[in-house]
Amino acid sequence: MLDKAAAVLDCFRPDGGRFRLTEITARTGLTKTTAFRLCADLVRLGLLERDGEAYRLGGKLFELGSLVPRRLDLREAALPFLQDLFEATHETVHLGVREGHEVVYVERIHGHQTLSLPSRIGGRLPLTCTGVGKALLAFSGPGLVDEVLAEPLPRLTSHSVTDPVRLRTAIEQIQVSGLAYEEQEAAVGVNCIASPVFDGPTAVAALSVAVPRGRFHPAQLAPAVRTAALGLSRVLRAGRGPMDTPS
């Protein structure tokens, strides 16, 4: 039953929308009776909430997620640097970690004019389609790079890089410069520059600035992004918020 309950919760990926019971049964493959019973139990436990005839994720999930030690330590250590980066650029700032072949966004700071981006706190995107993801991929070891490039590369927009040779060249450039670039690969009209964060030989996180394409000036943004990433790396290495290397 735990597997079935997890399947119900998992069907709310990737953007946490609201779903009717019929949609949940279609997404999970459960019978209507089983899905109804599980949803009722999850509502009782605060893991789901009723929204009219539909269900949505419950507040207790957010409370529990915010207590995950590794991400909590990282987020608390990173916030001053993210705030400094936002003040320096006045653009949308992200912090992400790697889980498998995806980047999971731990924090996001944006101004009053929010960009239309697929990223959200707790959300996942492919490593290869985002600046944060590319920075993580480039500094997660050659084994992971080979593993990712051996699979079909995902496409979020028509600008997403799906040629493994081209992507390998980009990764090699990131490894030299310490900066990852993304040009409309996750959202049309938006470019991004990112830099890895270290607490050991491989990247444990990466941070980025996302900017509308029309005002994307890498030469101006790069020093601020690099400075924030280096500062956070120093804090983590000093032991104030140590991180385990992700699998």
Image (cartoon, rainbow, N blue to C red):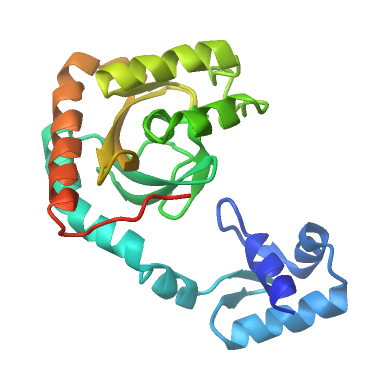
Residue in the image at 51% along x and 28% along y: 145
Instruction: Relative to 41, say whether 94 is above or below.
Output: above
Evaluate whether residue 186 shows in this view.
no
Residue in the image at 73% along x and 66% along y: 20
In percent of width and height, residue 62 lies at 43, 70
Quadrant for residue 69, please give it.
bottom left
Instruction: Relative to 30, say whether 241 is above or below.
Output: above
* Position of the N terminus by quadrant: bottom right
Quadrant for residue 88, please give it.
top left
In percent of width and height, residue 27 lies at 77, 58
Q: Nearer the viewer, residue 39 or 223?
A: 223
Along the horizontal axis of the image, is 54 left or right of 225? right
In percent of width and height, residue 17 lies at 59, 58
In percent of width and height, residue 90 lies at 18, 35
Evaluate whether residue 67 shows in this view.
yes
Residue in the image at 40% along x and 48% along y: 105
Along the horizontal axis of the image, is 24 left or right of 163? right
Residue in the image at 58% along x and 16% along y: 164
Q: Nearer the viewer, residue 150 or 22?
A: 150
Instruction: Relative to 7, say whether 217 is above or below.
Output: above
Quadrant for residue 66, please give it.
bottom left
